[in-house]
Amino acid sequence: MTPSPWWHVAALTLVFAAATFLFDWRAVPVVAIIHGLVAWRAPRPALSAAIAAACAWALLLGVAVLRGAPIGRFAHELAGIMQLPVGALVIVTLVFPAVLAGSAAALAVAARRIKPVT
């Protein structure tokens, strides 16, 4: 019996969250490349990496808010400087790792599927 795709995404979310917490945002494409190379036959590995990375960063933001980090105040201040709505900053914050992970996983899958010329 194979695990549900949602369990796969949930586990990958925890890996992205831990890697980002321990190393920083540059861990996102590294984890996504590894995922793309390992799970290249899975259905839509780039999509699962993108969803998991966005969920991981949402989880990290949520934990920071629960621990009392002044994220709301910072977001309002930054949004004022950039002349954007606060919601746009949150969306960009979650879209960035999704695009990074999705594209890195897609490149890894494509590289894995290349047949060598003999």
Image: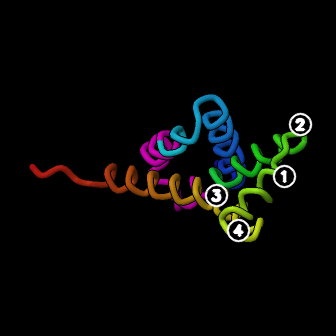
Decide which of 88, 21 is in the foreground and name it.
88
Magenta stretch in the rendered image: 30-51
Q: CA distance from mark 4 to mark 2?
A: 23 Å
Residue at (69% x, 48% y) in the render: 57
Whichever of labels 3 and 2 marks the residue nearer the N terminus, that label is: 3
Question: Do the residues under discs 3 and 2 have CB atoms within 8 angstroms?
Answer: no
Q: Which mark is residue 88?
A: 4
Image location (x, y in percent) of residue 4: 69, 53
Question: Do the residues under discs 1 and 2 have CB atoms within 8 angstroms?
Answer: no
Residue extending furthest toward the top: 22
In the rendered structure, which amino acid carries the disc numbered 1? Arg
Residue at (77% x, 57% y) in the render: 77
The crowd level at tag 4 (other Cα within 10 Å; few <14, some 14-19, many 20+) is few
Considering only vertical position in the picture, is 103 above or below 118?
A: below
Q: Is residue 8 left or right of residue 72?
A: left
Identify residue for label 3: 51
Image location (x, y in percent) of residue 107: 38, 54
In the rendered structure, which amino acid carries the disc numbered 3? Ile
